[in-house]
Image (cartoon, rainbow, N blue to C red):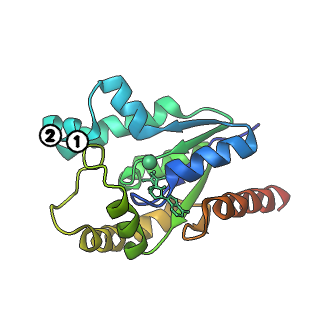
């Protein structure tokens, strides 16, 4: 059976970009938990956070995770999906989990080049590079813990896809 593949990592690591390319390479479907949440809520992530707080958002985020999980699907998860232990267990149990890992300054550069404030509320209101460092400090161990494979997300998207395919093939062979 073609297990779902969950992509985890901080904002800007390439979950959407790489996820779409990977879905084409494998002939899988592509889902994005943030997108699913916004479609079902008919509100942006920023609006859900404003209306219901981060706690309300996190609860709905878990529901989106369950809703999009299906065989032969690449699932781009929200950056904070790993915060809840239940989400981490769910992803590990239901599929393969890939961490797209990159240093804070790389993520900050990408987000600054393509600001998308409506979809991506800053968590603290502070400069993005500072915020990314803090987010990674707080979450790196969770990404590492949940992931079956850690992939270097600083490579070009095609190279990231290649590395993921390689990891998946190795895992199947072992
Ligand atoms: P995420 O979904 O993890 O937040 P995105 O896929 O939306 O990340 O990518 C954020 C930004 O970084 C986009 O502008 C995208 O084009 C760029 N980007 C993503 N992956 C790479 C990469 N491997 N190399 C260079 N730029 C990238
Ligand atoms: Mg995305």
Furthest residue in direction right, as rendered: 173
- At which x and y percent is residue 106? 43, 72
Q: Is residue 92 visible?
A: no
Furthest residue in direction front, as rendered: 113
Q: Give the residue at x 28% y 39%.
A: 45
The answer to the question of whether label 2 and label 1 lie on touching residues, with beta carbons closer than 8 A, is yes
Q: Is residue 105 left or right of residue 76?
A: left
Q: Please name whichever residue, 49 or 158, is drawn nearer the observer in this view of the structure.
A: 158
Q: Which residue is mark 2?
A: 50
Q: Is residue 174 visible?
A: yes
Q: Is residue 150 above or below residue 52?
A: below
Q: Is residue 88 left or right of residue 51?
A: right
Asked which secondary structure carries label 2, the reply is: helix
- At which x and y percent is residue 152? 58, 70
**Neighbours of disc 1 within 10 Å: few (<14), some (14-19), many (20+):** some
Cα distance, mark 2 to mark 1? 6 Å
Q: Which residue is mark 1?
A: 46
Q: Is residue 168 above or below residue 24?
A: below
Quadrant in the picture for residue 63: top left
- At which x and y percent is residue 167? 72, 62
Quadrant in the picture for residue 150: bottom right
Task: For ligand 2, tell me if the residue under mark 1 lies within 8 Å.
Answer: no
Q: Give the residue at x 14% y 40%.
A: 50
- At which x and y percent is residue 64? 41, 33
Asked which secondary structure carries label 1, the reply is: helix
């Amino acid at each position: 059976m073609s297990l779902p593949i969950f992509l985890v990592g901080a904002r800007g690591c390439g979950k959407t970009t790489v996820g779409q390319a990977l879905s084409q390479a494998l002939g899988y479907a592509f889902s994005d938990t943030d997108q699913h949440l916004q479609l079902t809520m008919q509100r942006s992530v920023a609006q859900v956070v404003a209306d219901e707080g981060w706690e309300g958002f996190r609860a709905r985020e878990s529901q989106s995770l369950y809703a999009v999980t299906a065989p032969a699907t690449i699932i781009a998860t929200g950056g904070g999906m790993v915060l809840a232990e239940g989400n981490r267990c769910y992803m590990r149990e239901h599929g393969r989990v890939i961490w797209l890992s990159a240093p804070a300054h790389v993520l900050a550069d990408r987000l600054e080049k393509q600001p998308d404030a409506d979809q991506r509320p800053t968590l603290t209101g502070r400069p993005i590079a500072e915020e990314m460092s803090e987010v990674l400090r707080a979450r790196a161990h969770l990404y590492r813990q949940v992931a079956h494979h850690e992939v270097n997300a600083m490579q070009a998207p095609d190279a990231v896809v290649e590395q993921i395919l390689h990891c998946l093939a190795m895992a199947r062979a072992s």
